[in-house]
């Protein structure tokens, strides 16, 4: 377990081009933020402190993990990732010691990105969070974030679906310097994500002309759901012995996905 939170993953080959639907403005803002990390001396001369922490928040499957990987790639940094729940331990001091080992391991491999998904499990509001152990773990995270220098080559990225649950002390500038919302994509965004996921796939002509329509008929879909839609469609095509994806495969996948989410929401009733 200790190793699973303190070992770098191979540098992701994901770039910002692979993240669709977040808009050019946000990409530009991210690049500006990263430029101060890439050139810390120039930033210091301009009186700017490179950021220590970035928060990404938004619904599940909108590309927060993907974006964190793209940022690591952009910085040519080692990528350490863990889920916030991996730090929840009943045993005394284990959560805090995992936080320490994670930061230590990352500092050894600087430049590095530390990515914590579901950070609300680690940095939830102290009162609601409950438990002395959880509080100690969060305190250790704050100590680690405060302990680093802004130009020590470590960027902390946290992601959550529940920004409202986060402890205010965690969100303070100097710990979290930038917050980006990653919303569900609109029609244009879904069209961009579709383009990303059809790259390299053999498509029949009837698919090519129906992609705008697909973007329109998938309102409420996340990037992860669009990716899964193409996977289902491709599996259907392979099973039928086809060499290319047809509109019929996409219609099949769309029906399955919509039926799947309807039965899920019926179960919730
Ligand atoms: P969670 O909140 O559930 O952890 P997430 O926001 O981190 O989800 P990802 O894990 O990044 O979402 O998305 C899962 C997969 O869905 C990605 O690997 C990618 O294939 C696809 N995907 C999601 N969002 C996008 C996007 N904006 N552009 C392109 N692909 C996307």
Image: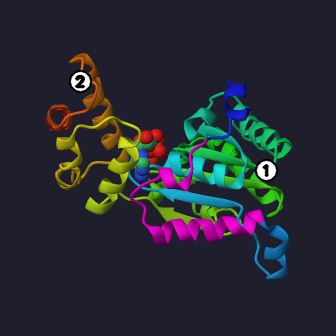
- Is most of the magenta stretch helix, strand or loop? helix
Q: Mark 1: which secondary structure?
A: loop
Q: Is residue 266 above or below residue 74?
A: above
Residue 200 vs residue 148, the one in the foreground: 200
| Quarter in which the C terminus is drawn | top left
Question: Which residues, given as a range, are shown in magenta?
Answer: 13-38
User: Residue at (58%, 63%) from the top-left corner?
Assistant: 168
The quarter holding residue 21 reads bottom left
Residue 98 vs residue 223, the one in the foreground: 223
Residue 15 within the segment the image draws in magenta = yes
User: Residue at (35%, 42%) from the top-left corner?
Assistant: 198
- In the image, residue 140 lies at what x, y percent? 74, 47
- In the image, residue 232 lies at what x, y percent? 27, 29
Point out which mark residue 111 bears. Answer: 1
- In the image, residue 217 lies at what x, y percent? 16, 51
Point out which mark residue 236 bears. Answer: 2
User: Residue at (79%, 75%) from the top-left corner?
Assistant: 43
Residue 212 within the segment the image draws in magenta = no
Point out which mark residue 122 bears. Answer: none
Position of 83 compared to 257: left or right? right
| Quarter in which the N terminus is drawn | top right
Q: Quadrant of ligand 1?
A: top left
């Amino acid at each position: 377990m200790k190793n699973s939170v303190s070992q770098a993953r191979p540098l992701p080959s994901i770039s910002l081009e692979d993240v669709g639907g977040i808009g050019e403005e946000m990409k530009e803002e991210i690049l500006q933020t990263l430029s101060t990390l890439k050139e810390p001396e120039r930033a210091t001369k301009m009186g700017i402190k490179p950021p220590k922490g970035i928060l990404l928040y938004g619904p599940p499957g909108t590309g927060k993990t993907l974006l964190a990987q793209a940022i690591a790639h952009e910085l040519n940094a080692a990528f350490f990732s863990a889920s916030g729940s991996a730090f929840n331990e009943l045993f005394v001091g284990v959560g805090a010691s995992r936080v320490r080992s994670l930061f230590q391991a990352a500092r050894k491999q600087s430049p590095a990105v530390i990515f914590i998904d579901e950070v609300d499990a680690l940095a939830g509001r102290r009162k609601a969070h409950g438990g002395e152990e959880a509080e100690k773990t969060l305190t250790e995270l704050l100590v680690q974030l405060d302990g680093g220098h802004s130009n020590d080559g470590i960027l902390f990225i946290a992601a959550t679906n529940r920004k409202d649950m986060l402890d205010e002390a965690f969100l303070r500038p100097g710990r979290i310097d930038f917050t980006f919302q990653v919303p569900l994509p609109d029609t244009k965004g879904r069209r961009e994500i579709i383009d990303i996921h059809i790259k390299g796939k053999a498509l029949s002509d009837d698919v090519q002309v129906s992609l705008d329509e697909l973007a329109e008929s998938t309102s409420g879909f996340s990037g992860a759901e669009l990716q899964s839609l193409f996977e289902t469609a491709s599996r259907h095509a392979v099973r039928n012995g086809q060499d290319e994806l047809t509109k019929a495969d996409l219609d099949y996948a769309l029906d399955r996905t919509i039926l799947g989410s309807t039965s899920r929401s019926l179960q919730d009733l």
